[in-house]
Image (cartoon, rainbow, N blue to C red):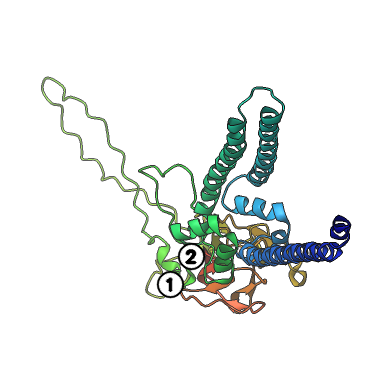
Amino acid sequence: MQSVIMEVAPPAAVAEAAGAAAGVAVAALLFAAVQLILAAGLYVWTALALAAVFRKVDRPAARAWIPVLNLWTLFEVAGMKGWWALVLIGGGLLTTVLASVTNALFIASAQNAAFGGSGGDAAGALLGATLVPIVLLLMFLAGAVILLIRMMGPLNRGFERGAGFVLLGVILLPVWASLIGWGSARWRGLARGGLPPTPFAQEPQPAASASSVPADTTAFAPPATAPFPAAAPVAAWSPPPLGPSPAAAPPAAPAVPAVAPAAPASALPPTTGEVEEHTVLAAHRRPSASLRLPDGQTIALPSDLVVLGRNPSPPADAAGAHPVAVDDATRTVSKTHALLRRGPEGWTVTDLSSTNGVIVGDGDTEIAVGTAVAVSGRFLLGDAELFLDTGAR
């Protein structure tokens, strides 16, 4: 009778156990929800910070929100192949799968050795189930760290940051992107590669500015000289005859030098007592406007409207502008950066909503977007230095 009472009594304990299990399930759901919220917040934070970084390096900010494409873009900016991002992501997935499969195989081997009587070493199988996945993960982490350091090195040099930022980018990418994207760092570009110059190579000379061209070009003409009289012919020498000399011949008349024929009277300029010795340079022979690019090349401006950029397109209000591509190793020049225009008052430059702005002269203040500013000589598109020679007009 007592045993029957003991079997019927536990419903309260069962209800308590069920309540405890429900509490554990709710706690697990809450924990999972908190993890998802934290992961989503981390993703949004990283995307916003990378978007700010991409805008500084003239890349589409929308790429920061696409998981693999954002890493692909970072590798490209660092001067590496973008598919290294696929190698990194694919290597992580493959390592995870191999570690899981290896762990399952070793555990199955340990179970067979312990309960199946197969004669295997259950302790060794359990040790392998623990160590082999750890070794695989460590190998992948070592390769990933080396690859990320290789990427972060050029990136931080381009932003003028040191080794501390390299380690920060490898360990905490969201923090690195926040400091670079929202901080004061400016993209200076990667160092230009190539062969060193020869010992006899000359440095590119800056184009002459308008102030260095003299207004009066008559000083460059050679001085006029008077015509020289034609020389008298010289008789060939012959030896004196032998024997008595004949009677002396009468002296010959002196040779008269030949005189050049006089020019027609209509071709001679009127004289005022002093001959003008300089020639005025014709207007069509005066130097035209030219532009020296960052690579040292100087080109003549073929039009009164010129649009500048890495791959420029004429703006809507200047559809006939002639495009001039600027080969910029610093990557600070936008695709369509600025507009040069020649008017009655001279040349002006206008910022076409570029990423890194336009600076005129030797200062460090960027001009306002859409405002035409007079330009002559040095000006900057981002960090690329150009020189405008307006010519003598």
Q: Position of residue 16 (x, y in %)?
A: 80, 66
Residue type, mark 2 in image? Leu
**Left or right placement of residue 253 versus residue 113 in this view:** left
**Left or right placement of residue 263 versus residue 127 in this view:** left
Quadrant location of the N terminus?
bottom right
Residue at x-position 78% and y-position 66%: 23
Closest to the observer, 337 or 272: 337
**Does 98 appear above or below 33?**
above
- Are the residues flagged by discs 1 and 2 in contact, CB closer than 8 Å? yes
Q: CA distance from mark 1 to mark 2?
A: 8 Å
Q: Position of residue 346 (x, y in %)?
A: 59, 76
Q: Position of residue 87 (x, y in %)?
A: 65, 42
SS class of the residue under badge 1?
A: loop
Closest to the observer, 107 or 101: 107
- Checking the image for residue 271, the label placed there is 1
Q: Quadrant of residue 48?
A: bottom right
Residue type, mark 1 in image? Thr
Q: Position of residue 148 (x, y in %)?
A: 55, 49
**Does 85 appear above or below 363?**
above
SS class of the residue under badge 2?
A: loop
**Does 96 appear above or below 43?**
above
- Checking the image for residue 165, the label placed there is none
Residue at x-position 47% and y-position 71%: 270
Residue under label 2, please give it: 268
